[in-house]
Amino acid sequence: MNSLWTKIILNTTLRKKKLSKYSNYVLAKGLKQFQILFKRRLIQLFLLSMGVLSAGFGLKGFLLPNHFIDGGAVGISLLISEITDWPLSLLLLLVNIPFVLLGLRTIGLDFAVKTAIGIVALALAVEVIPYPQITEDKLLVSVFGGFFLGAGIGLSMRGGGVIDGTEVLALNISKRSGLSVGDLILIFNIIIFSVAAYLLSIETALYSILTYLAASKTVDFIVEGIEEYTGVTIISPKSEDIRQMIIHDIGRGVTIYKGERGFGRTGHRDSEIDIIFTVITRLELSNLKAEIEKIDPNAFILMHSINDTKGGMIKKRPLH
C-alpha cells in the first residue's frame, strides 16, 4: 500500500515538473514572439513616419508651390487641386479611399490599416507642417521634388503600407490580365500626364514626367525593384515548420529541393537538408521574413526579383 502511494506521489511530482517546464517553454516562446512582433511594429512605424515626412516635404517644399504634379494617386490629387483649388490634404484622403478599400479586400486588414494610417498622416503633414519652399527652378523642382516624394513612397512600402494607392489597383488588375504591374502603372500615368497637358500646359506635363521618373527611380532604389513577385529561397533545419507556415499562414505554394549543407574552407559537407523555394508578392515579403524569424532566427534567406510568373498558385490566389 505504501509503495502504491509512493508511486502516485512520484508520478504526480513528475507530472507537475513536466507541466512547469512546458509552461516555462511556452512563456519563453511567447515572449520571444512578442519581442519580434514589437520590434517589427516599431520599425514599420518608424519607416512609415519617415516616409510621410519625406513625401510631405517633396509635395509642399517643391511640387505644390510650383504647380507641378506627379504620377499615381498623389498626381491625381495634385491635378485636381490645381484645377479646383481644393486643399491637397483633403484630396489625398478622398482619392486614396477606394485604394485602401481595395487593399483591404485583396491584401489584408493589416496592410489596409497601415496604408490608411500613412495616408491620413501624409494629409495631416501637408496641412499642418510648415514646410519651406526650397526653390523655384523648374528642373530642381522636378528632380528633387520627385526624389523626396519617391523616398517617402518607398519608405512607407518598406514599412508595410503605401501612401500612394495606385500600385494596389495595378496589382489587382494584373491578376486578371496579361499586363505586369509596371505596365499598368505606366498606362495610368500616361493618362494622368495627358490630362495635365490638356488642362494645364504641355510644359508642366513634361516637367511632371521628369518628377515621376525621379520619384519612380527613388522608389526602385529604396524597395529594390517594383516587380510584383519575389522569389525566396530558405535554408533552415526547421524547414518543415517553415513550409507549413508558408502554406497555411501566408497562403502560398512551395517547392522543396534536396540539398547538402557545405561550409568551411574545405567545403565540409553536413547532413542532407530540405531547401524551400516560394514565390510571393513584394507586399507579403515583410510578413514572410517576420514569420521565418519567429521559427528560426538563423535561417538563410535568399531573395531575388521576378518580372512575372505564369501558372501555379500565384495568379489564382488572392493576395494575403
Image (cartoon, rainbow, N blue to C red):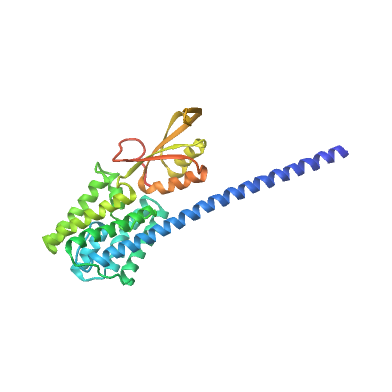
Tell whether 52 sits left or right of 36. Answer: left
Q: How many marks?
A: 0
Nearer the observer, 265 or 244: 265
Q: Position of residue 233 (x, y in %)?
A: 41, 37
Residue 272 rendering spot, x and y as whole percentages: 50, 28
Q: Quadrant of residue 210?
A: bottom left
Where 232 falls versus 28 (above or below)? above
Residue 162 relative to residue 140: left or right:
right
Q: Residue at x 24, y 67 (%)?
A: 134
Residue 245 rendering spot, x and y as whole percentages: 48, 41
Which percent across, then down, holds residue 297?
A: 50, 44
Residue furthest to the right in view is: 1
Of all residues, the one furthest to the front in this rendering is 265
Residue 195 visible in the current orientation: no
Front residue of this view, candidates 183 and 63: 63
Reply above or below: 207 against 125: above
Task: Tell me the quadrant of the picture where the N terminus can be found.
Answer: top right
- The residue at 30%/65% (across/down) is 57
Residue lying at 17% horizontally and 57% vertically, measured from the top left = 193
State which quadrant residue 15 falls in.
Answer: top right
Horizontal side, residue 142 vs residue 251: left or right: left
Residue 250 visible, this angle: yes
